[in-house]
Image: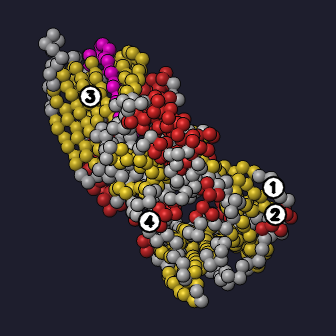
Amino acid sequence: MKKYLFALCVLLPVAPPTLAQAQNAIYAPLPGWVVPISEIPQASPDSHYYDQQFLIVDRQVNLVTPTPVEYKRYTSKVTAIEGVESASQISIDFDPSYQSVNVHRLELVRDGKVMDRKATAQIDRFKREVDLDSLLYNGDETLHIVLDDVKIGDIIDFSYTISGYNPVFGDHREWYIKTGWASTVALVNARILAPTDSTISVTNLDGKGLGDFRQTRDNGVTTFTYSERDGLYDFDEPEQPRWFNPYPYLHVSSFRDWKDVVDWALPLYQVNPDDDEVKALASDIRQTYPEDIQKQAIAAIHFVQNNIRYLGIENGIGSHQPRPPAQIVSQGYGDCKDKALLLSSLLGALGIEAYPALVDTSWREHLPSQPAAPYSFNHVIVAMDYEGSRWWIDATRTHQGNRLDTIAQSELGYALVIQPESTNLTAMTPPKVPVTQDIEQRYVINHANAQSYLTVKTVYRGLEAERWRRYLESKPLKELSEEYANYYAGFFGGLDFLRPLTVDDDMESNEVTLNEAYVIGDLWSKEDDTYKFVISGDIVDDYLIKPDLIRRKTPFRLGREGAIRQNIKLSLPESWDIEQSDNKVSNPFFEFSSSLKTVDGPGDVLFNKTYVEADYYYRAKTNHVEAKDLRDYMRQIDNAWESVDYEFTYRP
């Protein structure tokens, strides 16, 4: 599914027109329906800005005409050398399969004098692939305009319209208009025209915009306006949750509720178990597993995940409409919606009910608070009904296990299942794996004049196993072995392999196990006449994180799915006085425990040895910490850190 999040883009040149041709093609008078701002406002003396002062951001949308048109005007004053570079280059992005661009104003204001730059501006046109690294080709293009002779103190003032709307939405409309930024804007203006008899509504989402928002009706046209002077919404901070968006938006939509979205999506996502290609695949799967419907389901899932590579061609209606299953099988690739429709059709051909389901990888459990509209989603998975339970299958994953009860299901909070009876979001409640990473470290410890030994067994389960399975497929085992050995060499001197690293992969239980074994030549550190050795819940400790930015206004991102357990067993070379401990830290943010105790040895053959076991456990209870709770959270982290390390000492 096409994402509407801007990222680093790859610019691919297309055959450029000449300068004169480009100018003639794009320049046009201001449309009569636009209400222009007559004067450029002055920036407030206490405005917050970087290399530019933003004076006007004006967006007007005409939804009365059969072809929607959006007008944009941006005006800024250059205040630094960096601003000369950024302000003098204008990029206008559009999809040429259904959109066209006209530039109306291209001016530079210097010392009160207005200079038209249409005749001298350099114009280029590029393909803009924002998600190329994610194997998504969206077909967008960029009209790139470079202004000449720009200096500090100049005001850049340009406006344009983009006409056209993605035909995949039919008569429906949806727009997001941002009205606040982390820099002060002297004047933000928005104006939306809609037929009064339409279902189009405009909302100031969550009331975040602090400007003047109004609605009027006249001659069959409803006009929504928003105006704000010297608005500042400074919420840019690191380590925020992906779902957190504190900036104000106007949401324009003709969708009234989630059922409207389902009704729009149903014609696009027609599950087709009777497709010839799909029936042929189902027949092959049945012949391979004639008596086992669960194995048939797994085979269908594996086929779509592993045999249909991920690649999205998402221009035009391809942004939201999947290709037919036969086409995806034939070409051997597709994006999330293509693969979801193919898998739903293939499961249907096997007699298993399955439907595409719209989800969002950022909003997750916060999805119900978002507008009931298509742009609230950025991904498509499969809702499969089997033996009275619903399974959430992501057809874009790979390397999943061989049993339905052990494969990792999608945990994305809520989904909108595309089936006729759907009227609302469905909560996704797949079974959780209690511990996704289980580490057992065994030390055979000798005195400083002899070698010691360490073995490590790490078990990854569920989603972690599938991630490691995929990672190990392209990672040479020798290279991974060196990485692991270098990690422990950072703690101990003279470390070398006792045995090569091995990997065991149990596809049935969906577990991947890594086995390490080392000989340690210099385990003890010496201080004066005392030898010291420290054990640490180092793996669990990686989860006890504090934010880089402590004085913050916004939530801190925290937590990951599953829990981690680390067990350390030691055999010490003589009788040792052990101060046993048992520590627990439980709070609204996480659960942590650590313990140290003596245990029985492996038998009565070895004398004068002490056997010790340390246990660590961590599980996040939430995925974020509110700014007001951060000090409490950090105190809890400090409490946990107090019992992460245990020190052993002896004197010869």
Q: Which badge, 3 or 4, comes first in the chain's sequence?
A: 4
Labelled pair 2, 1 in contact (Cβ < 8 Å): yes
Q: Which badge, 2 or 1, comes first in the chain's sequence?
A: 1
392 up-or-down from 569: above or below? below
Mark in the foreground, 1 or 4: 4
Mark in the foreground, 4 or 2: 4
Q: CA distance from mark 1 to mark 4?
A: 45 Å
> Which residue has dot 1 on it?
16
Give the residue type that dot 1 points to: Pro
In percent of width and height, residue 190 lies at: 58, 77
Kind of element beneath mark 3: strand
460 drawn magenta: yes
327 up-or-down from 652: above or below? below
In percent of width and height, residue 422 lies at: 41, 60
Kind of element beneath mark 1: loop
Q: Is residue 12 left or right of residue 276?
A: right
